[in-house]
């Protein structure tokens, strides 16, 4: 536990990626394989179910610390993290132990589940009494199933790879299913990850490095000069999904996300759809939620990704499909050096035989002007704009950019985000790094256009005086929450204003006297029954503080309705139907 | 709040006021007579007509306030003012810091100012080694600070703390990186300088720290002789050096001379992970000049006071806790500390390099 706690402390400090990888490598070199097996499990995001309910832990902590619940709660409010609060309110340990992580997890934690409350209480209390604050914090996180630290699965794989000399993508494949809880981490399973001997079928699913796209920043009049004729380009809609590579080899399917993370288990529908592909096929494309024959808004996919277990309901509510736009391997042959247009032809032929997959439609227009016009429909079609790929281009590697515009780069020709100017009305303190700082804001727009500054000021006074609003009164209607987009200094400044303009406190939330106008950007807007405003925005974030904008010039519900109408005027773009 | 005619300290717009003595303690607005507990800026302000303070705080008060009409008293010595006997007693917070004892018509009140007491049991190893340690004074009513008045604030043993600072410095020095340790120029900086292992490498300080170091040395505190950063011409010296500077230098051009360096912040707030991460430094060391939770409980109990008035920091929590313990407890609203919210430590606790925890 000490070794793992030390690793955690190192990872938790502000450190460069390189330093984190080094810390991981040092840990893996020093830890017993049995302990490292569990460390990999936790670091890569594995979470055993909570073994003791928080309520029980809460009660034990209060008793051991000799403090009443209200005082524990006051501490929790200040700390912003339950595990950490417990770690600090307890008196110092009376003795120290140093058992390995595996012993802790296998013999102590997992066996807690289902015990009588009294026995759980006794055991947890005695565990706490042999650990220092940092170790207690970790233990609580592990007990509560809420362990998190600033490393990704990818970084863990990289550290294992660098430490052992085995390719990182191989490590990633061998780690498939490692954290899904079906097989307990063990020394044997861990050693397999970095074994220098070929691990047989585990190693077959290698993807190709993703070719990443670049943002196209060209004025409309420059298109003809810089890009030549649109006939030289394949123009496709840019879908808002998850970039993925589909690998079919040896009768098995692997799905890799853009971070070269293996996500096969998340998309059983795509696995099923890909089963019929010939062995030795690799496709590049986009995983999207596919409903009623079209791409559904990204928020559905986002909700689905958020689910840990894919229940029948989740699968029915948000079925996933794969929109293919490139083929990298066919019949076991690497096609990446073929021109884009030839790969496209092969792809069309392949997908035609596999109707369960979708083909990314190509748009053809005779001029860039006509394409620009079509692109202006993006929002209504639920896409982010166009992708431009030169017909002669090979499939490149990573983010490499060519010197000339037509040299093979993939271009994202995206549309600008939606934005409105709105008013901060509620604030809540953040968590973790932002505990005790007001960083999570709720924004409102006017119910109608204020006739002048005086009317807006009167509305603010009414809010400050807590007068219930009459139906015809000018009001501020809350519609979105955001917590990102400002610098630390800006957050500090806003925090200060919030503290000095607080009207009421409701637990962790404060209402403030409206005074700040923000430009809020978002990627999408939808109707919602969950919000009082009837509107939900996607990816809202603060673009800037509009210190220059008086309150009465903030936007209105009508502005939101107009965006909504624009966004959903016509059905979403449909990929080309498959010949079947 | 229960106040009565016989209270020796009451709250006024200008600050805490002693009615029979007609003077203020650490007032935040200009007054005629100010009794000062210590030289941090939120407790000792400019603009009062006359000052009374503990003798060991004189040098620092003069550095900070310049020409003032200042009378001093050695610790423990009394003067009589309008029938109020006034004396100063060590508070363990910074050089010259004092609690103010007032006695009038048989009643004894003590105003703590800021003080440092760590742990549930007295242990000389846990005293603040840069000044006279906190001395409990029996009284009927104790006016106490409670900056860290939550049970999550418990300081680790100082030996452990300084070992971790030394280890960080040594690791950096071995890697050829400067170690920039941020802490308030008055109090924190001297505790760091006194506590670290001087054999690890050279030590340099920021210009704001040195005048205070001199005051400490003059008072007989063992603070190493350290050059100013700006006096060091050979930048390669920084590679093994510990640099002690006020928090305001973080991210400034002043730090560029060190090249690749590791930064750390020393403060009681660093106890919490959120505060550490918010601070955006490589390391947070939990080093405070204020009492931790067990220390506050011990200090309050040692006074034998039946009545306690809390001045700053988590007042509501502390008042409720003390009331539950059977004491008569209430709070004064003061302008001490940087904090404007009983539930949260200061965000910008580095913005004011003078009065922090």
Image: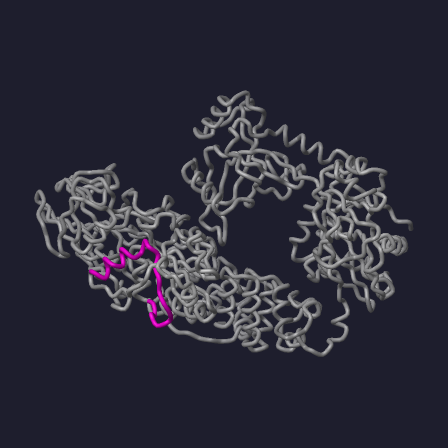
Residue A218 is one of the magenta-drawn residues = no
Residue B59: give x, y in percent of width and height. 20, 53
Indicate left or right for A381 with A482 as reference: right
Residue A580 seen in the figure: yes
Q: How many marks?
A: 0
Nearer to us in this view, A467 or A524: A524
Residue B331: give x, y in percent of width and height. 28, 45
Residue A482: give x, y in percent of width and height. 56, 43
- Residue reaching furthest to the right: A580
Residue A67 seen in the figure: no
Quarter of image, res B235? bottom left
| Stretch in magenta | B196-218
Indicate left or right for B101 with A229 as reference: left
Quarter of image, res A327? bottom right
Nearer to us in this view, A345 or A4: A345
Q: Is residue A452 above or below residue A120?
A: above
Indicate left or right for A163 with B216 as reference: right
Protein image colouring: one colour
Residue B240: give x, y in percent of width and height. 41, 68
Nearer to us in this view, A41 or A312: A41
């Amino acid at each position: 536990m000490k070794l793992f706690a030390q690793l955690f402390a190192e990872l938790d400090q502000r450190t460069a990626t390189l330093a984190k990888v080094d810390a991981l490598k040092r840990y893996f070199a020093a830890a017993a394989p049995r302990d490292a097996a569990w460390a990999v499990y936790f670091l890569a995001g594995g979470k055993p179910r909570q073994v003791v309910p928080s309520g029980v832990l809460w009660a034990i902590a209060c008793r051991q610390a000799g403090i009443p619940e209200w005082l524990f709660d006051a501490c929790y409010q200040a700390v912003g993290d339950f595990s950490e609060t417990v770690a600090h309110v307890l008196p110092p340990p009376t003795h120290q132990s140093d058992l390995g992580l595996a012993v802790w997890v296998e013999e102590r934690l997992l066996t807690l589940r289902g015990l009588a409350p009294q026995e759980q209480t006794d055991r947890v209390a005695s565990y706490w009494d042999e650990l220092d604050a940092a170790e207690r914090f970790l233990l609580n996180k592990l007990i509560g199933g809420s362990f998190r630290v600033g490393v990704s699965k990818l970084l863990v794989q990289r550290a294992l790879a660098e430490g052992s000399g085995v390719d990182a993508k191989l490590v990633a494949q061998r780690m498939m299913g490692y954290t899904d809880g079906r097989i307990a981490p063990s020394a044997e399973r861990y050693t397999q990850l970095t074994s220098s001997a070929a691990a047989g079928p585990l190693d077959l699913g290698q993807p190709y490095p993703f070719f990443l796209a670049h943002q196209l920043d060209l004025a409309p009049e420059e298109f003809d000069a810089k890009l030549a004729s649109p006939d030289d380009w394949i123009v496709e809609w840019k879908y808002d999904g998850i970039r993925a590579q589909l690998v079919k080899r040896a009768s098995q399917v692997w799905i890799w996300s853009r971070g070269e993370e293996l996500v096969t288990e998340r998309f059983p529908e795509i696995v099923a759809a890909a089963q019929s592909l010939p062995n030795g096929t690799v496709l590049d494309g986009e995983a999207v939620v596919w409903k009623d024959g079209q791409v559904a808004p990204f928020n559905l996919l986002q909700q689905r990704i958020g689910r840990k277990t894919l229940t029948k309901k989740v699968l029915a509510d948000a079925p996933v499909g794969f929109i293919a736009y490139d083929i990298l391997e066919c019949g076991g042959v690497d096609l990446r050096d073929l021109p884009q247009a030839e790969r496209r032809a092969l792809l069309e032929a392949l997908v035609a035989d596999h109707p369960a997959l979708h083909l990314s439609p190509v748009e053809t227009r005779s001029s860039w002007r006509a394409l620009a016009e079509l692109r202006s429909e993006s929002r209504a079609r639920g896409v982010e704009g166009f992708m431009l790929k030169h017909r002669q281009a090979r499939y490149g590697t990573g983010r490499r950019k060519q010197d000339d515009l037509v040299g093979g780069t993939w271009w994202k020709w995206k549309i600008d985000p939606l934005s409105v100017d709105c008013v901060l009305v509620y604030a809540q303190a953040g968590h973790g790094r932002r505990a005790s700082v007001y960083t999570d804001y709720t924004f409102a727009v006017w119910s109608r256009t204020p006739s002048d500054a005086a009317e807006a000021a009167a509305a603010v006074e009414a809010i400050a005086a807590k007068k219930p609003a009459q139906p015809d009164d000018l009001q501020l209607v809350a519609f979105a929450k955001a917590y990102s987009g400002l610098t630390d200094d800006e957050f500090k400044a806003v925090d200060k204003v919030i503290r000095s303009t607080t009207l009421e406190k409701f637990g962790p939330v404060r209402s403030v006297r409206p005074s700040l106008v923000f430009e809020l950007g978002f990627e999408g807007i939808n109707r919602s029954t969950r919000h009082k405003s009837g509107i939900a925005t996607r990816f809202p974030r603060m673009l800037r503080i509009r210190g220059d904008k008086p309150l009465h010039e903030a936007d209105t519900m009508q502005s939101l309705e107009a965006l909504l109408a624009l966004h959903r005027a016509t059905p979403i773009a449909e990929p080309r139907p498959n010949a079947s | 709040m229960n106040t009565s005619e016989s209270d020796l300290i009451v709250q006024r717009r200008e600050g805490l006021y002693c009615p029979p003595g007609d003077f203020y303690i650490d007032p935040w607005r200009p007054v005629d007579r100010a009794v000062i507990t210590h030289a941090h800026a939120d407790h000792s302000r400019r603009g009062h007509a006359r000052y009374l303070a503990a003798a060991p705080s004189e040098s620092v008060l003069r550095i900070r306030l310049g020409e003032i009409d200042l009378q001093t008293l050695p610790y423990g010595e009394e003067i009589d003012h309008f029938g109020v006997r006034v004396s100063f007693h060590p508070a363990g917070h910074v050089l010259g810091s004092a609690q103010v004892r007032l006695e009038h018509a048989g009643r004894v009140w003590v105003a703590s100012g800021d003080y440092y007491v760590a742990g549930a049991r007295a242990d000389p190893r846990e005293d603040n080694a840069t000044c006279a340690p906190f001395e409990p004074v029996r009284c009927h009513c104790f006016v106490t600070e409670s900056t860290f008045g939550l049970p999550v604030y418990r300081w680790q043993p100082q030996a452990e703390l300084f070992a971790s600072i030394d280890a960080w410095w040594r690791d950096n020095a071995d890697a050829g990186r400067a170690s920039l340790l941020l802490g308030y120029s008055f109090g924190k900086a001297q505790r760091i300088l006194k506590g670290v292992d001087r054999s690890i490498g050279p030590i340099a300080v920021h210009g704001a720290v040195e005048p205070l170091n001199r005051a400490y040395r003059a008072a007989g505190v063992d603070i190493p002789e350290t050059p100013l950063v700006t006096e060091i011409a050979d930048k390669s010296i920084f590679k093994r050096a510990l640099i002690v500077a006020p928090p305001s230098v973080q991210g400034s051009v002043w730090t560029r001379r060190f090249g690749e360096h590791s930064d750390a912040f020393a403060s009681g707030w660093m106890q919490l992970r959120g505060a550490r991460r918010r601070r955006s430094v490589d390391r947070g060391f939990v080093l405070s000049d204020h009492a931790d939770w067990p220390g506050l409980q011990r200090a309050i109990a040692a006074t034998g006071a039946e009545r306690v008035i809390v001045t700053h920091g988590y007042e509501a929590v502390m008042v409720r806790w003390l009331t539950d313990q059977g004491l008569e407890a209430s709070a004064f609203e003061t302008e001490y500390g940087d904090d404007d919210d009983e539930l949260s430590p200061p965000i910008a606790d580095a913005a004011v390099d003078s009065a922090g925890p």
